[in-house]
Image: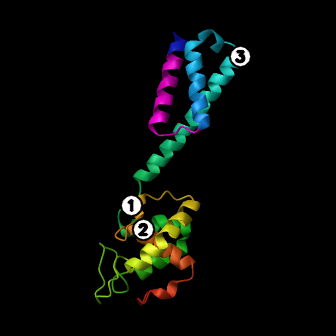
Amino acid sequence: MRFLQIVLVLSLIVAAAAQAKASPSRMRHAHDVIRFFEHHRKQASSPTGQRKLFGAVELLDRRIRVLNRQVRTLQSIPADWLSSVNDVGRFFGAGTASWERSCSQQGSEGGWGRWVPSSSGSGAGGWLQFMSGTFYGIIDEAIADARSRGMLVPSSARDWYSPLGQAIAGAQMLLDGRRGEWSGYAC
Protein backbone atom coordinates (compact mmCIF):
# COMPACT_ATOMS: atom_id res chain seq x y z
CA MET A 1 0.00 0.00 0.00
CA ARG A 2 2.76 2.46 0.91
CA PHE A 3 4.52 1.80 -2.40
CA LEU A 4 1.36 2.71 -4.33
CA GLN A 5 1.09 5.99 -2.41
CA ILE A 6 4.69 6.84 -3.27
CA VAL A 7 4.10 6.05 -6.94
CA LEU A 8 0.94 8.18 -6.96
CA VAL A 9 2.76 11.15 -5.43
CA LEU A 10 5.63 10.72 -7.88
CA SER A 11 3.21 10.61 -10.79
CA LEU A 12 1.64 13.86 -9.60
CA ILE A 13 5.07 15.46 -9.35
CA VAL A 14 5.94 14.33 -12.86
CA ALA A 15 2.62 15.68 -14.17
CA ALA A 16 3.20 19.05 -12.47
CA ALA A 17 6.71 19.28 -13.92
CA ALA A 18 5.41 18.37 -17.38
CA GLN A 19 2.70 21.04 -17.20
CA ALA A 20 5.37 23.58 -16.33
CA LYS A 21 7.16 22.60 -19.57
CA ALA A 22 10.16 21.41 -17.59
CA SER A 23 11.41 18.47 -19.61
CA PRO A 24 15.10 18.66 -20.44
CA SER A 25 16.85 15.31 -20.73
CA ARG A 26 17.32 14.94 -16.95
CA MET A 27 13.61 15.54 -16.36
CA ARG A 28 12.78 12.91 -18.98
CA HIS A 29 15.20 10.51 -17.34
CA ALA A 30 13.60 11.08 -13.92
CA HIS A 31 10.20 10.47 -15.46
CA ASP A 32 11.45 7.25 -17.08
CA VAL A 33 12.89 6.01 -13.77
CA ILE A 34 9.56 6.54 -12.04
CA ARG A 35 7.67 4.81 -14.85
CA PHE A 36 10.09 1.89 -14.69
CA PHE A 37 9.45 1.35 -10.99
CA GLU A 38 5.69 1.62 -11.50
CA HIS A 39 5.95 -1.50 -13.66
CA HIS A 40 8.75 -3.29 -11.74
CA ARG A 41 7.74 -2.91 -8.10
CA LYS A 42 10.02 -5.64 -6.73
CA GLN A 43 13.13 -3.87 -7.99
CA ALA A 44 12.10 -0.69 -6.15
CA SER A 45 12.79 -2.44 -2.86
CA SER A 46 16.45 -3.12 -3.69
CA PRO A 47 19.05 -0.60 -2.46
CA THR A 48 19.97 0.36 -6.03
CA GLY A 49 16.34 0.75 -7.00
CA GLN A 50 15.64 2.93 -3.98
CA ARG A 51 18.66 5.14 -4.74
CA LYS A 52 17.50 5.63 -8.33
CA LEU A 53 13.92 6.27 -7.30
CA PHE A 54 14.83 8.77 -4.59
CA GLY A 55 17.30 10.49 -6.96
CA ALA A 56 14.50 10.95 -9.50
CA VAL A 57 12.18 12.30 -6.81
CA GLU A 58 14.84 14.71 -5.56
CA LEU A 59 15.49 16.05 -9.05
CA LEU A 60 11.80 16.61 -9.74
CA ASP A 61 11.29 18.17 -6.32
CA ARG A 62 14.15 20.65 -6.91
CA ARG A 63 12.73 21.57 -10.33
CA ILE A 64 9.27 22.18 -8.88
CA ARG A 65 10.73 24.43 -6.15
CA VAL A 66 12.55 26.47 -8.80
CA LEU A 67 9.38 26.74 -10.89
CA ASN A 68 7.34 27.84 -7.86
CA ARG A 69 9.92 30.51 -7.07
CA GLN A 70 9.77 31.76 -10.67
CA VAL A 71 5.97 31.86 -10.59
CA ARG A 72 5.98 33.87 -7.36
CA THR A 73 8.50 36.29 -8.86
CA LEU A 74 6.48 36.70 -12.06
CA GLN A 75 3.33 37.32 -10.04
CA SER A 76 5.07 40.18 -8.25
CA ILE A 77 6.08 42.09 -11.40
CA PRO A 78 5.29 45.75 -10.78
CA ALA A 79 2.63 47.56 -12.79
CA ASP A 80 3.33 51.14 -11.71
CA TRP A 81 6.30 53.43 -12.23
CA LEU A 82 7.73 53.72 -8.72
CA SER A 83 7.47 49.98 -8.05
CA SER A 84 9.16 49.32 -11.40
CA VAL A 85 11.98 51.73 -10.54
CA ASN A 86 12.48 50.09 -7.15
CA ASP A 87 12.50 46.62 -8.74
CA VAL A 88 15.05 47.68 -11.37
CA GLY A 89 17.14 49.28 -8.61
CA ARG A 90 17.49 45.89 -6.89
CA PHE A 91 19.30 44.56 -9.97
CA PHE A 92 21.02 47.66 -11.39
CA GLY A 93 21.86 49.37 -8.10
CA ALA A 94 20.21 51.81 -5.71
CA GLY A 95 21.90 54.77 -7.41
CA THR A 96 20.12 53.91 -10.65
CA ALA A 97 16.73 53.81 -8.92
CA SER A 98 17.45 57.08 -7.12
CA TRP A 99 18.39 58.80 -10.39
CA GLU A 100 15.28 57.47 -12.18
CA ARG A 101 12.99 58.68 -9.36
CA SER A 102 14.65 62.08 -9.37
CA CYS A 103 14.67 62.49 -13.15
CA SER A 104 11.08 61.38 -13.58
CA GLN A 105 9.54 63.63 -10.95
CA GLN A 106 6.79 66.03 -11.97
CA GLY A 107 8.19 69.05 -13.78
CA SER A 108 11.47 67.39 -14.68
CA GLU A 109 10.48 64.67 -17.15
CA GLY A 110 7.25 62.67 -17.16
CA GLY A 111 6.05 62.41 -13.58
CA TRP A 112 5.27 59.44 -11.35
CA GLY A 113 1.67 58.80 -12.38
CA ARG A 114 0.45 57.43 -15.68
CA TRP A 115 2.24 57.43 -19.04
CA VAL A 116 2.58 61.09 -20.12
CA PRO A 117 3.14 62.45 -23.64
CA SER A 118 5.64 65.28 -23.98
CA SER A 119 4.07 68.70 -23.46
CA SER A 120 6.40 70.19 -26.09
CA GLY A 121 5.00 68.00 -28.86
CA SER A 122 8.37 66.35 -29.52
CA GLY A 123 6.89 62.86 -29.70
CA ALA A 124 8.58 61.72 -26.51
CA GLY A 125 6.51 60.00 -23.88
CA GLY A 126 6.41 58.08 -20.65
CA TRP A 127 7.98 58.53 -17.28
CA LEU A 128 11.46 59.24 -18.66
CA GLN A 129 10.15 60.91 -21.84
CA PHE A 130 11.68 58.44 -24.27
CA MET A 131 11.37 58.94 -28.00
CA SER A 132 9.93 55.69 -29.33
CA GLY A 133 12.98 55.10 -31.57
CA THR A 134 15.38 55.56 -28.65
CA PHE A 135 13.34 53.21 -26.48
CA TYR A 136 13.03 50.47 -29.09
CA GLY A 137 16.70 50.88 -29.98
CA ILE A 138 17.89 50.05 -26.46
CA ILE A 139 15.21 47.83 -24.91
CA ASP A 140 16.48 44.47 -26.21
CA GLU A 141 19.99 45.14 -24.91
CA ALA A 142 18.55 46.43 -21.62
CA ILE A 143 16.36 43.36 -21.10
CA ALA A 144 19.28 41.05 -21.90
CA ASP A 145 21.39 42.91 -19.33
CA ALA A 146 18.60 42.76 -16.74
CA ARG A 147 18.18 39.01 -17.28
CA SER A 148 21.94 38.47 -17.01
CA ARG A 149 21.71 40.12 -13.56
CA GLY A 150 19.02 37.60 -12.51
CA MET A 151 15.93 39.71 -13.12
CA LEU A 152 12.86 37.96 -14.52
CA VAL A 153 11.55 40.27 -17.23
CA PRO A 154 8.22 39.61 -18.95
CA SER A 155 7.92 40.14 -22.70
CA SER A 156 5.46 42.98 -22.01
CA ALA A 157 8.44 45.11 -20.88
CA ARG A 158 9.36 45.56 -24.58
CA ASP A 159 6.46 48.01 -24.91
CA TRP A 160 7.13 51.77 -24.92
CA TYR A 161 4.08 52.15 -22.65
CA SER A 162 5.43 49.73 -20.02
CA PRO A 163 6.69 51.35 -16.80
CA LEU A 164 9.00 48.38 -16.23
CA GLY A 165 10.33 48.64 -19.79
CA GLN A 166 11.07 52.34 -19.42
CA ALA A 167 12.76 51.76 -16.05
CA ILE A 168 14.98 49.02 -17.52
CA ALA A 169 15.80 51.08 -20.63
CA GLY A 170 16.63 54.12 -18.48
CA ALA A 171 18.92 52.04 -16.25
CA GLN A 172 20.72 50.67 -19.31
CA MET A 173 21.21 54.14 -20.80
CA LEU A 174 22.52 55.39 -17.47
CA LEU A 175 25.01 52.52 -17.32
CA ASP A 176 26.03 53.23 -20.93
CA GLY A 177 26.89 56.82 -19.96
CA ARG A 178 23.96 58.39 -21.80
CA ARG A 179 22.67 60.55 -18.92
CA GLY A 180 23.00 63.69 -21.05
CA GLU A 181 20.08 62.64 -23.27
CA TRP A 182 17.63 63.90 -20.64
CA SER A 183 17.10 67.60 -20.21
CA GLY A 184 14.92 67.74 -17.10
CA TYR A 185 16.24 69.85 -14.23
CA ALA A 186 16.52 66.84 -11.86
CA CYS A 187 18.35 64.60 -14.33
Q: Secondary structure at mark 3?
A: helix
Q: Categorize mark 1 by other alpha carbons within 10 Å: few (<14), some (14-19), many (20+).
A: few
What is the span of residues highlighted in magenta in the rendered image? 5-24
Q: Which residue is mark 3?
A: 47
Magenta highlight on residue 12 = yes
Q: Quadrant of residue 25 in the image?
A: top right
Classify 97 as above or below 63: below
Question: In this view of the protein, can residue 128 be seen by the observer?
Answer: no
Q: Categorize mark 2 by other alpha carbons within 10 Å: few (<14), some (14-19), many (20+).
A: many
Q: Residue 67, which numbered label?
A: none
Q: Position of residue 63 (x, y in %)?
A: 55, 39
Q: CA distance from mark 2 to mark 3?
A: 53 Å
Q: Position of residue 56 (x, y in %)?
A: 61, 28
Q: Identify which residue is drawn at 40% across, 51% down.
A: 75
Q: Position of residue 34 (x, y in %)?
A: 57, 22
Label whose residue precedes the other's in the sequence (3 or 1)? 3
Q: Which residue is mark 1?
A: 156
Classify 88 as above or below 135: above
Magenta highlight on residue 102 = no
Question: In this view of the protein, can residue 88 be seen by the observer?
Answer: yes
Q: Quadrant of residue 126 in the image?
A: bottom left
User: Which amino acid, mark 1?
Assistant: Ser
User: Which amino acid, mark 2?
Assistant: Gly
Q: Secondary structure at mark 2?
A: helix
Q: Which residue is mark 2?
A: 165
Q: Categorize mark 3 by other alpha carbons within 10 Å: few (<14), some (14-19), many (20+).
A: few
Q: How is colour applied across the structure in the image?
A: rainbow
Q: Identify which residue is drawn at 29% across, 78% down.
A: 116
Most common secondary structure along the magenta stretch: helix
Label whose residue precedes the other's in the sequence (2 or 1)? 1
Q: Secondary structure at mark 1?
A: helix
